[in-house]
Image: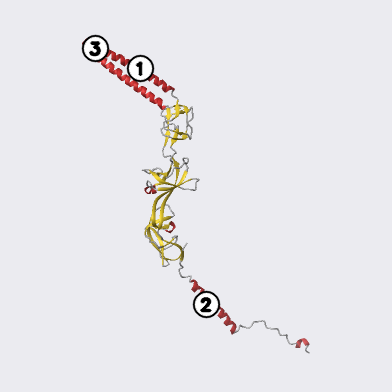
């Protein structure tokens, strides 16, 4: 006998397995993939990463223009005439008659050295001269007496008295010279100004012992100072008398005109510098040693071609610049005037209108470039 459970029909469950995609869905995926591929190919065709790109460069056009070549140096205010004064004799400073900054005239007494000892020397020399004069007079009288006696005096006696007179005269001359020398030494105990000027250095005090090696003081004429400077020997041949200069004293905002007034005939082998003096066109009053910024104008041209230093390529063949022609950088040899400046004068290799690349770093001859104006 069958039970109800035995005769029940099993329950049906839905099939959750997705059916295979139909033909329309496959076609949509193919179209989408083809579109992406076409877009990618278009981007590659536009960008062309395999092709060499032109380098962007900044250029300037070579143009004739007035050019001034200037040598910039620093100098210091110095006197045209100055002198260091040292004593000609040693001794103690009895009196000092000037102070630093005083203006003195030529021949003025500046200091006095103790002369007591020298005065004693002079008195001794005077006494010796007096004795020599007495001896000379005695010899003269004796010789004239013998000469007057004529034949009553032996010839040998007369000759001896003549020699005695000559010796006495020589002694007088010697004593006179000694007295003159002592008086000159006495004069040297008084220190006088050899030139008119101002006392710029004073190194001694009253009571100080000095000798001929002691620098007592320095005098300088401050009426028309100059600027003293050194020019490196690399540019020594460029400096000449009369060249104009622009001067600016430290602490001033205005400039003053000047000119080269002295060029040393030789270069200092120890420093490699050439001594140069620059005079002011109009008188100036300034303390000695003041720093002066100086621009010496060594060359002026009404029209010249110049390029920046960054545009110049230096190699074994010399100097060159890159000139842009039809989108290509071409290396062109040039000749320049070497000078310590940001721009150099080109004397050969460029013509007006050439398009010069301002920064030549990393460029190669024949490289494709895109020119841009600064």
Q: Is residue 42 left or right of residue 365?
A: right
Q: In which quarter of the image is the N terminus?
A: bottom right
Disc 3 to disc 1, C-alpha distance: 27 Å
Mark 2 secondary-structure assignment: helix
Name of the residue lying farthest toward the front: 282
Residue identifier under label 3: 148
- Label 1, label 2: how many angstroms apart (C-alpha)? 135 Å
Distance of label 2 from label 3 (alpha carbons): 154 Å
- Rate crowding at label 2 as few (under 14), some (14 to 19) or many (20 or more) other CA atoms within 10 Å: few
Q: Position of residue 325 (x, y in %)?
A: 40, 66
| Looking at the image, residue 280 lies above or below residue 318 | above
Residue 130, which numbered label?
1
Please tell me which of labels 2 and 3 falls first in the chain. 2
Q: Is residue 256 above or below residue 33?
A: above
Check contact, mark 3 vs mark 1: CB within 8 A: no
SS state under label 3 = helix
Q: Position of residue 180 (x, y in %)?
A: 36, 23
The x and y percentages for residue 239 are: 38, 47
Q: Do the residues labelled 2 and 3 touch (CB within 8 Å)?
A: no
Q: Residue lying furthest top in this view? A: 152
Q: In this view, does 210 lie above or below 241?
A: above
N-terminal label among 1 and 2? 2
Q: Position of residue 297 (x, y in %)?
A: 41, 50
Q: Which of marks 2 and 3 is in front?
A: 3
Please say which color scheme the image uses: secondary structure
For residue 334, say whether it is visible: yes
Numbered badge on residue 38 = 2
């Amino acid at each position: 006998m069958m039970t109800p459970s035995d005769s029940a029909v099993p329950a049906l469950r839905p099939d959750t397995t997705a059916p295979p995609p139909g033909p329309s869905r496959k076609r949509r995926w193919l179209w989408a993939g083809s579109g992406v591929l076409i877009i990618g190919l278009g981007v590659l065709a536009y960008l062309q990463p395999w092709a060499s790109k032109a380098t962007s460069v900044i250029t300037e056009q070579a143009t004739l223009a007035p050019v001034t070549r200037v040598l910039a140096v620093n100098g210091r205010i110095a006197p045209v005439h100055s002198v260091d004064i040292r004593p000609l004799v040693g001794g103690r400073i009895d009196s000092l008659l000037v102070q630093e900054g005083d203006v003195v005239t030529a021949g003025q007494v500046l200091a006095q050295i103790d002369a007591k000892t020298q005065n004693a020397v002079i008195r001794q020399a005077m006494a010796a001269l007096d004795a020599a004069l007495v001896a000379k007079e005695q010899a003269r009288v004796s010789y004239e007496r013998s000469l007057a006696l004529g034949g009553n005096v032996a010839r040998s006696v007369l000759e001896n008295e003549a020699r005695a007179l000559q010796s006495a005269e020589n002694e007088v001359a010697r004593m006179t010279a000694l007295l003159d020398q002592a008086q000159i030494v006495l004069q040297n105990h008084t220190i006088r100004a050899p030139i008119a000027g101002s006392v710029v250095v004073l190194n001694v005090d009253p009571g100080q012992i000095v000798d001929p090696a002691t620098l007592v003081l320095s005098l300088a004429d401050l009426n028309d100072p100059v600027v003293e400077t050194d020019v490196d020997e690399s540019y020594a041949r460029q400096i000449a008398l009369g060249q104009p200069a622009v001067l600016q004293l430290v602490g001033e905002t205005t400039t003053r005109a000047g000119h080269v007034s002295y060029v040393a005939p030789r270069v200092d082998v120890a420093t490699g510098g050439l001594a140069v003096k620059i005079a002011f066109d109009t008188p100036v009053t300034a303390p000695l040693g003041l720093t002066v910024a100086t621009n010496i104008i060594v060359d002026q041209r009404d029209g010249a071609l110049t390029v920046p230093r960054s545009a110049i390529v230096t190699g074994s063949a010399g100097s060159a610049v890159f000139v842009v022609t039809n989108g290509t950088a071409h290396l062109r040899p040039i000749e320049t005037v070497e000078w310590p400046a940001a721009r150099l004068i080109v004397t050969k290799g460029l013509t007006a209108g050439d398009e010069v690349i301002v920064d030549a770093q990393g460029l190669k001859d024949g490289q494709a470039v895109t020119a841009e104006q600064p």
